[in-house]
Amino acid sequence: MNDHGTERESEKDDDGEVLPRFKGLPNITEGVENIYDHLLQRHKYHYPEDGSHMAWIAPKIIVLFATGNVNKVVDAVVKDLKHPIGANLIASVLVQEPIRQKFIKKLRMRMETMDERIANHPNFLHTLKMIKRMKCQTVHMEEFDIADKQKKYGRMTPKSPIIVLGFPQIYLGDKPTGVITLSSFRTLNESVQLVERERLDFGTISIWSCKLAEGYDMISGVPRLNNFRFNCINVPFKDDFSAWIRNSVHYEELTVLGKMKTIAFPISSPVFAS
């Protein structure tokens, strides 16, 4: 019925066919001038499609000791900073203090702008608010005015990725944040404590060191984690070997060219966060 009490004519298309009405469905474009921008705005709340914006999916943590390969770790971090929301990405990095400044300097020089979908993502925008609220120190890309020849008054480049210093991911939100956290440690015990402080269920822990024993000590120190990688990060797991630790001795069984090999060597006593 219309305002005059008569039945309203059914809407018709150009050929006179009656257009169907979908009762009960909201009109998502009502009052919208630019439908494309409107749908794009709605879409970002559901991106990525695998749901990795709603909950962490197999995040990774890197532990870089002073003897580890800094350049390889920088490569991995820069790659994941391009699109820092998704599955199987680096969430946190722990760096031993003697190489902290070297690592940050190399990282800052290598940074590239993020995917625009992440720069405008609600998760990332929420993280920016938390960073400002907690006054977190960050590593990011900077730009300067032409008059600022000494580059004293930089500002963050639009779409710059962000490394948050000294804070764990749990402080920034309960969903994937769109940033990577970085903390420093002095000893192996401290690195174990920092892994636990992140409070994420890491799918992989990647340990970089020339001292193999440090890697195995981390296995004892963080028993809740299952997948360890030494001096690598994206290497798939092979099922043709087994390993275990008993009475502070590490045992391995390997299949090499079809023949079984056994290895055993002592490791230090397990370390645990206090």
Image (spheres, grey):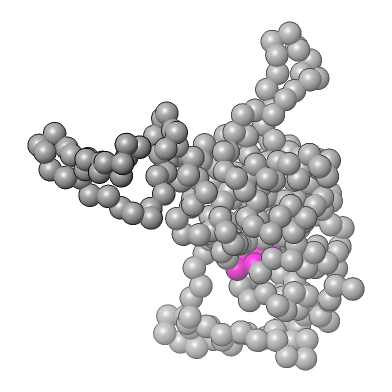
- Which region shows up in magenta? 202-208
Q: Quadrant of residue 161?
A: top right
Q: Residue at x 58, y 38 (%)?
A: 119
Give the camera-side residue of 192 and 86: 86
* Observer able to see residue 236: yes
Q: Hey, which quadrant is residue 228 in on the image? A: bottom right
Residue 112's x, y, as percent? 58, 35
Task: Estimate the x, y position of residue 158 in percent, counting from the top left.
Answer: 61, 29
Q: Is residue 99 above or below residue 90?
A: above
In percent of width and height, residue 31 lies at 44, 33
Quick one: which residue is furthest to the top in this view?
147
Q: Nearer the viewer, residue 249 or 227?
A: 227
**Which residue is found at the position 70% from the left and 86% from the top?**
245
From this view, report whether residue 167 is shown above or below residue 213.
Answer: above
Using the image, determine if residue 236 lies above or below residue 254. above
Was residue 236 drawn as part of the magenta stretch in this picture?
Answer: no
Quadrant that contains the C terminus:
bottom right
Say if the magenta span includes residue 204: yes
Is 121 on the left-hand or right-hand side of 149? left
On the picture, is 43 further left or further right than 119? left
- Residue at image location 77% in from the left, 55% down from the top: 171
Name which quarter of the figure residue 19 lies in: top left
The spot of residue 65 in percent (x, y) is: 76, 58
Q: Main secondary structure of the magenta part?
A: strand
Inspect this view and state whether residue 104 appears: no
